[in-house]
Amino acid sequence: MTINPLTGFLLAAATIVLVCHTLGAVAARCGQPRVIGEILGGLLLGPLALGLLWPAAETALFPASVQGSLDLAAQLGLVVFMFLIGCELRTNELGGSRRVPSVVVLAAMGIPFVGGVAVGVLGVPLIIGDAGNRTMTILFLGLAIAVTALPVMAKILVDMGQERSRAGVLALAASACGDGLMWVALTVLLGTSGLHGSSPTFTIVASLVLLAVTVLVVRPLLGRLVRRADRTSRGENWLVPALIGGALAYAVVTQTIGLHLVIGAFLFGTAVPRRSPLVERISEQMQGFTHILLLPLFFAGIGLKISGTALGSSAAAWLMFGAVLAVATIGKLVGGAGGGRLAGLPGPDAWRVGALMNCRGVTELVVAAIGWQYHLINRLGLTIITLVALITTAATAPLLRLADRRTVRPTVPARDPRELPVSLPDSGDRVGAGVGAGVGGTRRAVVDLPV
């Protein structure tokens, strides 16, 4: 039976969304972030599982015409996702000394980057793409290994109730700084490569001009627009199109000057003002649509490009995969934990920082997709980086629970049942030195009640 291309696209999209979110629910019941199951669902719909077990079904569900449409929808999802990541990057709200997270950033990114470069030097013939640029492929592998996924890390911390812990706050701050640094480094790498067909000089000059325009013109203009929208009852009606249109326009500009489109969306997101209730509400609404529909299409697009046969029976390929996984995991754990110790954290908290910085999530998949599109890596390289992202992200929550079990918690003596906390009105009478200010203008005290 011949299926209309639109019907085929809708059928494929419906299948992807159902499979990804079903496995996401299973992952959540297993104590993992939902995104782990969603990524796994996208991978299983490709040659890794469906194509291996039922090739006819994969061919019927994802013909070439449907794959082209899915790729376009996935690119739209990436633009919106990276715009939202830029909106949530709040390096100006780290609090305290910025020297503390910088220690963790340098250690948790520097060690895996150097390790990734070392592995790339030895194994670049196995993963180099059609671009044939050894140096760019080696540097790209180092950056891909050094990635930390801020959104997934934040979700894990919230699920485990550790978002306000010392380790959680430090890891979030370091990840925010590290994400910004990684995207700058990737921008420089792509800008100087000339792989897009543009002159490296033109790309660098155009990027600097775009950055200056963003800081000097676009950011202040967005500030005035957001303040005006906050004061207007219908401000959301025109602020949403302005933000989405701006992100798409920035994606077009960066793609045109020789950079990847997600870099433009990310840059525009960083220019959006913070601490606006309206922006927060718009961001939540866009996150819902992006995470439910667009990101699963991106996961499936990655899944259709990787293959279990890429590793095959080649000992060299499996050795390369093991080396990348080991360097990625050990580098992040040692770098994050070492940086945490240098920042003054005790051993268990420093271990938590290392475990959190090892979370790569969707961010590394985005970086891997960029390397694939620019032909810096081949199918084996894409497969290795994707599997490393999935494994290291899945290991984050268990590593945190392991740190919790090893932490010795102080024993709290049992309270006398006759001592019950009560709230006393804040009057002019003083009730003793043991009374402290409470919420809502009350004072807290412990009184003896007859049994």
Image (tube, helix red, strand yellow):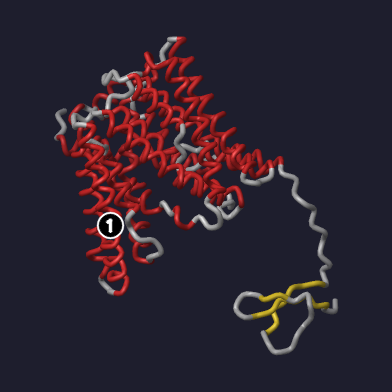
Specify few, some or many for label 1: CA neighbours under 10 Å numbering under 14, 14-19, or 20 or more.
few
Q: Which residue occupies 42% across, 15% down? A: 123
Residue 378 image position (x, y, % from top left): 32, 20
In the depicted structure, whether residue 216 falls above or below residue 202:
below
Q: In the rendered structure, which amino acid carries the disc numbered 1? A: Leu
Query: Residue 307: image x %, image y %?
Result: 36, 21
Look at the numbered disc 1 and give the secondary structure of its residue: helix
119 or 99: nearer the viewer: 99
- Of residue 43 and residue 371, the one placed in the foreground of this image is 371
Q: Quadrant of the C terminus?
A: bottom right
Which residue: 50% across, 55% down?
94
Q: As drawn, is 353 to the left or to the right of 92?
A: right
Residue 107 appears at what percent x and percent y?
A: 54, 36
Left or right: 31, with 383 as reference point = right
Q: In this rendered view, identify the residue nearer to me: 211 or 153.
A: 211
* Number of numbered markers: 1
